[in-house]
Amino acid sequence: IFRASDAGGSMTIHVFGAFFGLAATMFFSRKEACADIHKKDDGTYSSDIISMTGTLFLFVFWPSFNAALHTGPAAMRCVINTYLSISTSVIASIIVSKLTHKGQLEMELILNASLAGGVAMGANALIITRPFGAMLCGAICGIVASLGYVFLSPALRRSRLKLHDTCGVLNLHGLPGVIGGITSAIVTHFGEERFGQNFLEVYNAY
């Protein structure tokens, strides 16, 4: 319907999972206790270290998620684009953390927003053919996800909906997944202009 590529399941897995989880939160969370719950969400030093270990594993293995269904040059392109995108989202999350937390590194923000580029590449890893495209997409997702942790999540808790997003699935999975889907549709459009209707076959071949 959207004529968009989704090689790594960014739109179908991340976006659906994020918004389904938020919808479930509206029905199952204790709305009157959202403010108090948030205070208990602050991680300790040991939990942050463990979380960082998990983030490092995801950083290393996320390209295999996006390239799992492809072989040869197509798989290699998926791996390279994913690494480029994640790398720029890490840099973007650190910059936003420095700007919004008085020069400090906020672990929760960096641990999650740094992976936003990998989420977006789920829909774009196969069809982006130039490095700057993957890096730009990753940087945008890192900025959006980081700002979501700083501004959007507190606003949702204070809103009438009282949405309590414990792990920030909206910021890490939902928003980057939407950005990745839009980017994929744009790349698909220009790809068809350049290669014709069978441009995905052309990209798979080279």
Image (cartoon, rainbow, N blue to C red):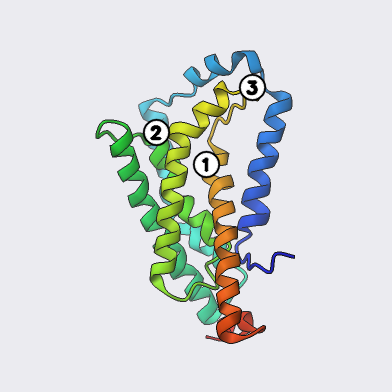
| Mark before the other along the chain sequence, 1 or 3 | 3
The residue positioned 66% from the left and 17% from the top of the image is 30
| Amino acid of disc 3 | Arg
Q: Vertically, is 140 above or below 46? A: below
| Amino acid of disc 1 | Asn
Measured in 3D between alpha carbons, the distance from the residue under mark 2 to the one under mark 3, in whole angstroms, is 31 Å
Compared across the picture, whether 122 is left or right of 101 comes to: right
Contact, mark 1 vs mark 3 (Cβ under 8 Å): no
Q: Nearer the viewer, residue 142 or 51?
A: 142
Residue receiving disc 2: 48
Image location (x, y in percent) of residue 7:
61, 67
Compared across the picture, whether 19 is left or right of 1 comes to: left
Q: Quadrant of the N terminus?
A: bottom right
Crowdedness of circle 3 by 10 Å Cα count: few (<14), some, many (20+)? few
Residue receiving disc 1: 171
- Could you tell me which secondary element the residue under label 3 belongs to? loop
Residue 66, picture quadrant: bottom right
Residue 88, picture quadrant: bottom left
Image location (x, y in percent) of residue 37:
55, 18
Crowdedness of circle 1 by 10 Å Cα count: few (<14), some, many (20+)? many
Measured in 3D between alpha carbons, the distance from the residue under mark 1 to the one under mark 2, in whole angstroms, is 18 Å
Residue receiving disc 3: 160
Q: Vertically, is 126 above or below 171? A: below
Q: Nearer the viewer, residue 39 or 100?
A: 100
The residue positioned 43% from the left and 33% from the top of the image is 150
Q: Nearer the viewer, residue 57 or 4?
A: 4
